[in-house]
Image (tube, helix red, strand yellow):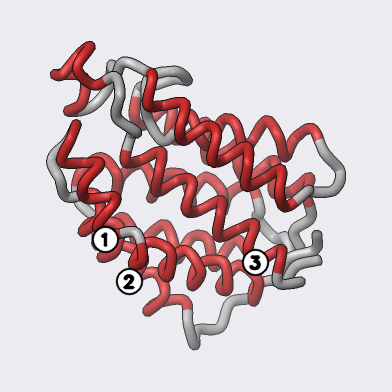
């Protein structure tokens, strides 16, 4: 895996496609345990992301990821905007001056993003949030020298589904307490879509 600026932009475009395709599902999940606006917010955010990164000139991966962060922060309100904006901003810090991103740099980026989300959301693993998916993927990527695409998809998907059996202790879902059990966290699903997009870009032969 050797990703350039163009590969990061392709990743963002693929995320945007996935978010659009799954907007209704994200909304349904959020209606169960949240405000019901996660799908709308994610569509708005990644539409702005691709609008700003497509056709622009970037000299480093860090610059692209910083633009992703700013686009999300400036277009998405609520917790998801703050958390995803923080994630990609910290990711950009971890890739400063990097022209080509390999697996080790990706691992550092995910770790930095995860740390930022934990700090911003005052949350940790097992609390039924997007953090659970980022943690699982981060652990997997840290342990390998070469990414197995099917395994990456499996790790992200399993982490998403595992939130179904968790009791929410953060965000609006926490008000439901035990009643939140049995529902997939919408942030976990959007995070799954982010990493599914990563896997699909790798699968197309980009960044490899």
Report the mark closest to the observer, 3 or 2. Answer: 3
Residue 176 rendering spot, x and y as whole percentages: 15, 18
Q: Is residue 142 visible?
A: yes
Mark sitting earlier along the chain (3/1) = 1
Which residue carries the number 1 mark? Answer: 74
- Locate residue 64, reporting x and y percent: 54, 67
Residue receiving disc 3:
201
On the rendered structure, is 51 left or right of 14?
left
Quadrant of residue 7 in the image?
A: bottom right
- As drawn, the residue found furthest toward the top would be 178
Circles 2 and 1 in contact, beta carbons < 8 Å: yes
Distance (Cα) linking label 2 and label 1: 9 Å
Rounded to the nearest whole Å, what is the CA distance between mark 3 and mark 1?
Answer: 26 Å
Element carrying mark 1: helix
Which residue: 25% across, 41% down?
29
Q: Secondary structure at mark 3?
A: helix
Vertical arrangement, residue 20 with respect to residue 114, above or below: below
């Amino acid at each position: 895996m050797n990703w350039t600026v163009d590969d990061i932009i392709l990743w963002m475009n693929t995320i945007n496609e996935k978010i659009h395709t799954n907007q209704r599902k994200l909304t349904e999940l959020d209606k169960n345990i949240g405000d019901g606006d996660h799908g709308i917010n994610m569509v708005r955010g990644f539409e702005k992301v691709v609008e700003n990164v497509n056709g622009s000139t970037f000299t480093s991966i860090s610059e692209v990821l910083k633009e992703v962060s700013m686009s999300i922060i400036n277009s998405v309100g609520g917790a998801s905007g703050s958390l995803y904006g923080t994630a990609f901003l910290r990711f950009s810090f971890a890739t400063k001056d990097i022209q080509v991103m390999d697996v080790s740099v990706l691992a550092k980026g995910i770790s930095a993003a995860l740390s930022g989300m934990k700090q911003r959301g005052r949350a940790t693993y097992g609390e039924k949030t997007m953090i659970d998916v980022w943690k699982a993927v981060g652990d997997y990527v840290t342990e390998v020298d070469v990414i197995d695409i099917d395994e990456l998809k499996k790790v992200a998907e399993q982490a998403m589904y595992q939130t179904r059996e968790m009791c929410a202790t953060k965000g609006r879902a926490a008000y439901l307490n035990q009643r939140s059990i049995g529902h997939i966290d919408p942030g976990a699903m959007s995070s799954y879509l982010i990493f599914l997009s990563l896997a699909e870009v790798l699968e197309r032969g980009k960044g490899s």
